[in-house]
Every structure is written in structure tokens, then in C-alpha cells.
Image (cartoon, helix red, strand yellow):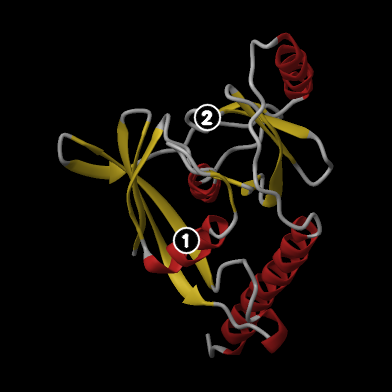
Amino acid sequence: MKILDFDLEGNHFIIEADISLRQKADDNMKSHWPHYFFENTQVYKEIDEVVSPFPITAVTWYGCQLTADHALEDVVERITRNETGKLTVREVCPELQEFLDEFNKYPAINGERKIPYFILLDGDIARLAYATNRFLYYADGNNMPIMFRTDDGTLISNNEFADIGLFNSKQCVQDGTERILPFTEYESDMVSTWNLEKKAYLDSLLDAFEDEDEQEDELPF
């Protein structure tokens, strides 16, 4: 089933996946995390109205081969931060949109581009910590800064250069070359809450895989 249809850096992509309902305990019914699992992810690219499987050849800096699941996570992260620079979303399936809508409930800055307070980052939740008219700095689970462009949400740095950028932005605010942007903050423990809910989500995903394995073991083959 098609779950995402989008343009990224001028190229048209489609992501498909199998969707199954997550089995939730009553105390997880209000979880911010998806109520569905997305499995067997496939990425396709359209060129001249011809849609073909898109081979993912990229690797991480430490040599890990990226997969279709990584591609899905990357696009979802871009959507949660309302990136408009390189990404244009054409269509999102209702099951995934339900999850994305959770981030829309916590706007930090309302302007030409709505800037969310919470975003998805490397599978965890990050919160907006500092904002200027040029750059946004989100704090990850280790309270380390991640640097984005304010105008379009494009990622600039997720390493030590973000620390340098934050220091420079604070200096520029003092010098008057950057202007600090006030933003709406939400309860600081929300990050911990979201990440605890993520553990429950991953546990239920693991349980689902174990159930499938048990069913396969029972087949008379």
C-alpha cells in the first residue's frame, strides 16, 4: 500500500509498506506513537511517468548500509519539522498522517512556516531550545543541539558544528546581526513521556514479530 508520495530535491518518490494495526494495552491507547506498524517498506522513483524500484546505495559514515526503512524514517522526520526547502509532500496515508498530526498539536512559532516545538530526530523526540530569524536549535535526548534553517527547516548540522553554530548565533544576537525569536514552550517532561511511549511501541512491535514466528513454527511444513 502506498503510504507516502513526495518530491525530494526535485525527484519524485513513492514509499509503499504493509500496514497492520498495533495491538495496544489500555494504558497505551493515548500514546503519541503510531497505532500501526509499517513493514516490508519499498521505495520507488518516478521518471518520465515510469515508476521503478529505487535501489538505496547510500551508507552511513560508519559503513552501515541504509535501507528503505531508513528512507521512510528520514522523510517522516522532515515532515515532523515541516521542512519546505527540499521536500514537497504530495500524499500521506491516513494511518501515517495520524502519527504526524501529533506534532501539529504543539506549534512553537506560527508564521509563514509553522515551526513545531517537538520533532522526530534519529527515532527519538527533540524539542526546540533556541531560535533566531536564521537558525533553529533543537535539543535531542542528550540535550545536544541540532541545527536547522529557520526559513525552511533544512538540516544544517547534527554534530559538533551545531554547538559552534549555537555559540555563534548567541553572539550574533548580542551583535544585532541575528534576532532571537520567542516561541511557545511545552512541558519539559513531554520528551521523556514520548520516548517512554516509544519503548512501549517498540516492545509491541517485537511482540508482534515473536507472534509471527510462533505461528510459523506451528505450520505443518
Q: Nearer the viewer, residue 190 or 197?
A: 190
Q: Is residue 59 left or right of residue 68?
A: right
How packed is label 1: few (under 14 Cα within 10 Å), some, or many (20 or more)? few
Question: Which residue does the image show at 42% across and 29% down from the upper left?
Answer: 85
Q: Nearer the viewer, residue 81 or 170?
A: 170
Tag 2: residue type? Thr
Contact (CB < 8 A) between labels 1 and 2? no
44, above or below 93, in the image: above
Question: Which residue does the image show at 68% across and 11% down from the upper left?
Answer: 176
Q: Is residue 13 left or right of residue 206?
A: left
Cα separation, mark 1 vs mark 2, equals 28 Å
Residue 34 spot, x, y in % from top left:
56, 68
188, above or below 154, in the image: below
Q: Can residue 79 be seen at all in this image of the molecule? A: yes
Residue 107 spot, x, y in % from top left:
57, 51
Residue 108 spot, x, y in % from top left:
60, 46
Residue 219 spot, x, y in % from top left:
54, 88
Number of the label disc, if any, that sits on residue 154: 2
Q: Is residue 70 left or right of residue 24?
A: left
**Label located before the other in sequence (1 or 2):** 1
Q: Quadrant of the N terminus?
A: bottom left
145, above or below 28, in the image: above
Q: Can residue 74 be seen at all in this image of the molecule? A: no
Number of the label disc, if any, that sits on residue 108: none
Q: Nearer the viewer, residue 133 or 206?
A: 133
How packed is label 2: few (under 14 Cα within 10 Å), some, or many (20 or more)? many
**Residue 6: quadrant of the picture:** top left
State the residue position of label 1. Answer: 40
